[in-house]
Structure formats: C-alpha cells, structure tokens
Image (cartoon, rainbow, N blue to C red):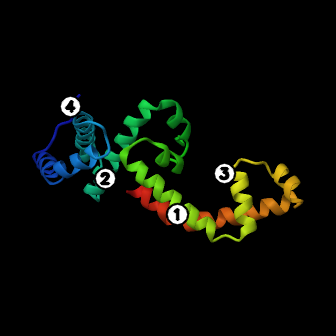
Amino acid sequence: MAIPVSSEAKQNIIQTVRDYGKRLFYFIRGRVNTDEDAEDILQDVWYQFSNVVHSEPIQQTGAWLYRVARNRIIDKYRRRQADSLDELFDEEEGEFSFDEVLLAETPETAHLRNLFREQLLAALDELPPEQRQVFVWNELEEISFNEIAKQTGEKINTLISRKRYAVQHLRKRLEQLYTEIIQS
C-alpha cells in the first residue's frame, strides 16, 4: 500500500537524492564488488529514506543515509557469510559487535583490521609486562588460567587480577577507535 506523499515531501526526497546521490553511490561502490551491488544497495537506501521521511524527522540526513548504506553493505555480506556473521551479531542489543566490524569481508575492513591490530599492539606495549603476558596467554593464545598458574607458579586470583587491569587499560585505550569505527 502506497503512502500518500505531499508535494513538500517529494521535493525533500528529490533534493536529498540530488545532494547525496553520487557521493553515496561512490561510498557504497568502494565497499562492494560490482556496480550492480552498489546500485541495489543504493536503491534500498532510497526506498528506506522515502518511507522514513514520512514518519519521523531526520536530524542529520547525510549521517542517516551513510549509516543506512553501511548497514545495508554489512547485511549483504552477512547473507553471504551467514554462519560466521550471524554468530557475531548481538541481536539482543541490536548493535554490531566490534568483532563483526573487523571480520566482515569488505574492502574497508582490511584497513580497519590493520588499524585495530596496530592500536592493540601499541596498547599492549603500554601495559606492565606481567599484565601483558597474562592477557596474551589467556586471550590470544587461549591458555587457561589453571595452565598459566602451573607454568608461572602464580595464584589464579593474581592472574585474573592482572588480566582485569589489562582489559581495563585496553578498553580505555581503544574506546576512541571503537567509537570511530562504529560511527563511520
């Protein structure tokens, strides 16, 4: 069922397409494999925009359009890699996990993955050696606290505490990067 569109709403949609059409297409095209994929996604974005413009005001049209486009791109790759990405999507919160952004196979993610890796390594280097080592063993090498305790002779509670301090530092240190990736 078609929603009646006022003359003012039509003009708003037409002007938005003129203002953002080419830039939005090139934004999408840079992240998908073919022009056809980019056109399909762009059409979905315009369709959603034309439906939303009637029901709710959009404060920052450009940001809204790019966010919808980015979500459509992710949706397209999620369909291709349904098994791995569906597990990474946090449906309860309705948000993408940091892992999903880094593991989705798009041209942009190679750069993001490298940037994240560089920032993580730099943040790990800032940690005291004991905290860094426990974090690396437990998170990156997947060694249990019991095994680490056997190897080092440290108490498990000490190891857990060291890892907790490492995680707190890494969260604080990587928070800005996380925000930039999610909002881009």
Mark 3 or 1, nearer chain start: 1
Dividing the picture into quadrants, the one containing residue 152 is bottom right
Can residue 95 be seen? no
Which residue is painted at 69% across and 49% down in the image? 141
Query: Residue 74 placed where, x, y %?
Result: 40, 41
**Residue position marked by numbered label 1 in the rendering:** 119
Query: How packed is label 1: few (under 14 Cα within 10 Å), some, or many (20 or more)?
Result: some
Please state, as top left, top right, bottom left or bottom right, where the C terminus lies in the image: bottom left
Of labels 4 and 3, the one closer to you? 3
Which residue is painted at 28% across and 50% down in the image? 65
Cα separation, mark 3 vs mark 1, equals 15 Å
**Residue position marked by numbered label 3 in the rendering:** 140
**Residue position marked by numbered label 2 in the rendering:** 64
Does residue 27 appear left or right of residue 86 in this picture? left
Kind of residue indicated by mark 4: Ala
Kind of residue indicated by mark 1: Gln
Cα separation, mark 2 vs mark 4, equals 23 Å
